[in-house]
Image: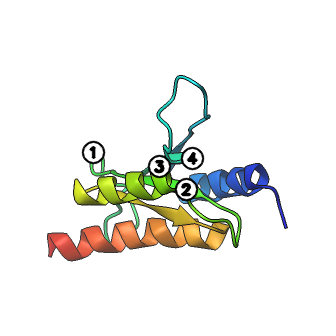
Amino acid sequence: MPRESSLTDQIVKALRREGCYVEKVHGSPFGLRGSADLVVCVPMLNEAGKILPGQGRYLRLEVKRPGQALSAIQKARIYAAGDAGGRSGVVRSVADAVNAVHIVRNTQRTESQ
């Protein structure tokens, strides 16, 4: 089973291939406890697959290895982001992360129709 840092690196590469802007959040004594590992800007696409300028959506992702549990503070931050209308979640594989991006894109299409 890959280390969480290795999985995170794989996810970052895959999301960048999807056209996303990705920031990896490094934990430190000065950071906010329970912050997501990745802050992702998902570009919205038109029907032709071209990026719609100024139409990106932010997504915060907590990366966990399969079987690894979220801490209470991580759960609280995910729920708080959702309660505020944000998009946030936990991913355990590259496929989970790419799927999260596709969900954000499909949700936007549904909302705009």
Of 14 and 96, the residue lying toward us: 96
Choose mark 3 or mark 1, whichever is in front: 3
Q: Residue at x 58, y 25 (%)?
A: 29
The reply to whether dot 4 and dot 2 touch (C-beta < 8 Å) is no
CA distance separating discs 4 and 3:
10 Å
Quadrant the C terminus occupies = bottom left
Q: Residue at x 40, y 73 (%)?
A: 103
Q: Which labelled disc corresponds to residue 95?
A: none
CA distance separating discs 3 and 1:
15 Å
Q: Position of residue 28 (x, y in %)?
A: 61, 28
CA distance separating discs 2 and 1:
34 Å
Q: In the rendered view, would you say 33 is above or below 97?
A: above
Q: Read off the residue under disc 1.
A: 54
Label 1: few (<14), some (14–19) or many (≥20) C-alpha neighbours in 10 Å: few
Q: Three-letter amino acid code at disc 3?
A: Val
Q: Position of residue 97 (x, y in %)?
A: 56, 65
Q: Which labelled disc corresponds to residue 40?
A: 3
Choose mark 1 or mark 4, whichever is in front: 4
Quadrant the N terminus occupies = bottom right
Of 100 and 108, the residue lying toward us: 100
Choose mark 2 or mark 1, whichever is in front: 2
Comes first in the chain, label 1 or label 4: 4
Q: Read off the residue under disc 4.
A: 37
Q: In the rendered view, would you say 36 is above or below 68?
A: above
Label 4: few (<14), some (14–19) or many (≥20) C-alpha neighbours in 10 Å: some
CA distance separating discs 1 and 4:
24 Å
